[in-house]
Amino acid sequence: MSLPALAGSRVQALLDRARSLDFLTPLALRLYLAPVFFSAGLNKLTAFDATVAWFGNPDWGLGLPFPWLMAFMATATELIGGVLLLLGLATRLISVPLMATMLVAIFAVHWPNGWFAIAPSNAETSMARPLAALGIPAAKASLENSSGVNERLAQARGLLQEHGHYDWLTEKGTFVVLNNGIEFAATYLLMLMVLFFHGAGRFLSLDYWVSRFLTASDRESVSLPQPESC
């Protein structure tokens, strides 16, 4: 065997051995998403009347029909979904309504604001720049928006540095412009799609152990001697 072939074989063997840790990926996704959805549901629950009003109001809210029912379903889905994702129980099943909530959020809330959740303030480093070079109108508009964001942030910093306690105000983080685009919701949707198609993962999910228990029970029932027919 030639040296390149031998090296390639060893690399492939190492990659194959790494598959023994494939359960870490769905575990990481679950641990990431569980607090996101549970906290979102808890926020809706603690201000449920305001949530219902926001779901139903067509002027400053979503304008959805049956706002109480829709708010209840979204709240319950996020609360229960957060717990189930943490436990790795019914993961593929609960991913379906959670994906539905993300689709509603993308198209009913964030879509008019474009992609970015936080508006880029530097057009030179914006990920929209290569897309704008391809002539995509939305990317060009995003670069123009970045220039405006940078100008406004510079004005705000100047005012706060001159008239405010700027060091104290920025001690916990810098100021940004919230764009409220689809970025986060789309990211969560993609993560949920992985869990839907691949499940909660081995070893560290209840789904895995329930499946093993049911499989063992099925084998035992098949191996039991059948009564002789008369």
Image (cartoon, rainbow, N blue to C red):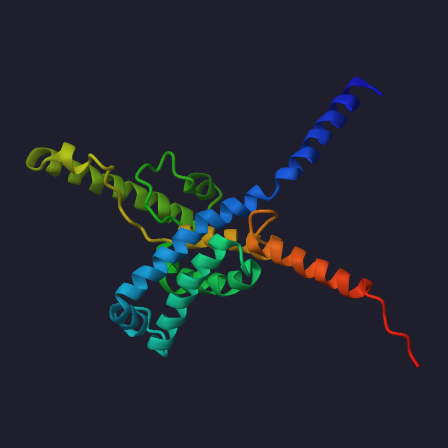
Q: Is residue 123 left or right of residue 209?
A: left
Taking the view exactly as shown, the residue that stands out farthest to the right is: 230
The structure residue drawn at horizontal position 82% and vertical position 62%, both measured from the top left corner, is: 223
User: Looking at this view, is 71 or 121 the one in front?
Assistant: 71
User: Looking at this view, is 162 or 46 the one in front?
Assistant: 46
Image quarter of the N terminus:
top right
> Residue 104 appears in which quarter of the rendering?
bottom left
Percent of width and height locating residue 98:
47, 62
Can residue 26 be seen in the rendering of this structure? yes
* Number of marks in picture: 0
Q: Is residue 13 left or right of residue 159?
A: right
User: Looking at this view, is 209 or 6 the one in front?
Assistant: 209
Taking the view exactly as shown, the residue that stands out farthest to the left is: 163
The structure residue drawn at horizontal position 82% and vertical position 19%, both measured from the top left corner, is: 2
Image position of 229 with respect to 163: above or below:
below
The structure residue drawn at horizontal position 33% and vertical position 60%, both measured from the top left corner, is: 42
Percent of width and height locating residue 92:
57, 60
> Residue 25 appears in which quarter of the rendering?
top right
Percent of width and height locating residue 129:
42, 39
Can residue 197 be seen in the rendering of this structure? no
Image position of 142 with respect to 221: above or below:
above
Percent of width and height locating residue 215:
71, 59
The structure residue drawn at horizontal position 40% and vertical position 57%, both measured from the top left corner, is: 37
